[in-house]
Amino acid sequence: MKKWVMMVGGIILFAAFVFMNRTGLERRNNAKLEQMGENAGIFRSFFSELESNTGCWVLITSGYRSTEKQRILHNKNPKNAPPGKSRHEWKKAMDINLLCWDGALRKATAKEKWKRKKVDALAKKHNLIWGGDFRSYYDPVHFAIR
């Protein structure tokens, strides 16, 4: 049942963005990339190749975070980095979902599905840390500059 609910949720999420035109998605992503300053190009290049190789659309869910925002997230979930320790605060990390025709890849998506899309290999190629490889906290939506 849980797997079915997650699949339906992914399809609904994808359908919502199919109806929202590609231009709107790009505008949203570009606004988040602009906040990344000099690191925007690294992520832009990675996301472009990710979309080309997977046939999925990248939806940036988080980029730069203030220390206060990081404190709020850490208080909600202590597995999140404490304030002052997150690469998001240094404009060196972004979180994404992948919107694919065969379903969305999100935080709750199994590692094997992310790996089938070769997300881990592309992150490595772009010298990025992939949160799906974290030992203590599975965070496949997270990509960070080394």
Image (tube, rainbow, N blue to C red):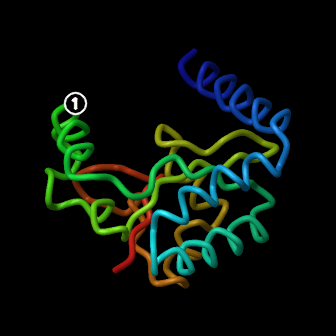
> Is the residue 9 above or below the residue 41 in the image?
above
In the image: residue 8, left or right of residue 19: left
In the image: residue 129, left or right of residue 77: right
Say which of 15 and 3 sits in front. Answer: 15
Which residue is at a point 76% across and 46% down the rendered structure image?
24
Which residue is at a point 55% across and 64% down the rendered structure image?
33
In the image: residue 46, left or right of residue 85: right
> Residue 39 at x, y = what percent?
46, 78
Say which of 52 and 121 sits in front. Answer: 52
Which residue is at a point 83% across and 49% down the rendered structure image?
22
What is the crowding at mark 1: few (fewer than 14 residues within 10 Å), some, or many (at least 20)?
few
Label 1 sits on a secondary structure element that is: helix
> Residue 61 at x, y = what percent?
52, 46
| Quarter of the rendering containing residue 52 | bottom right
Which residue is at a point 49% across and 52% down the rendered structure image?
111
Residue tagged by mark 1?
76
Q: Quadrant of the N terminus?
A: top right
| Quarter of the rendering containing residue 119 | bottom right
> Is the residue 35 above or below the residue 67 in the image?
below
> Residue 79 at x, y = what percent?
20, 43
> Residue 104 at x, y = what percent?
67, 41
Say which of 98 and 44 sits in front. Answer: 44
Q: Quadrant of the C terminus?
A: bottom left
| Quarter of the rendering containing residue 114 | bottom right
Q: How many marks?
A: 1
* Amino acid type, callout 1: Lys
> Is the residue 10 above or below the residue 88 in the image?
above
> Is the residue 17 above or below the residue 143 in the image?
above
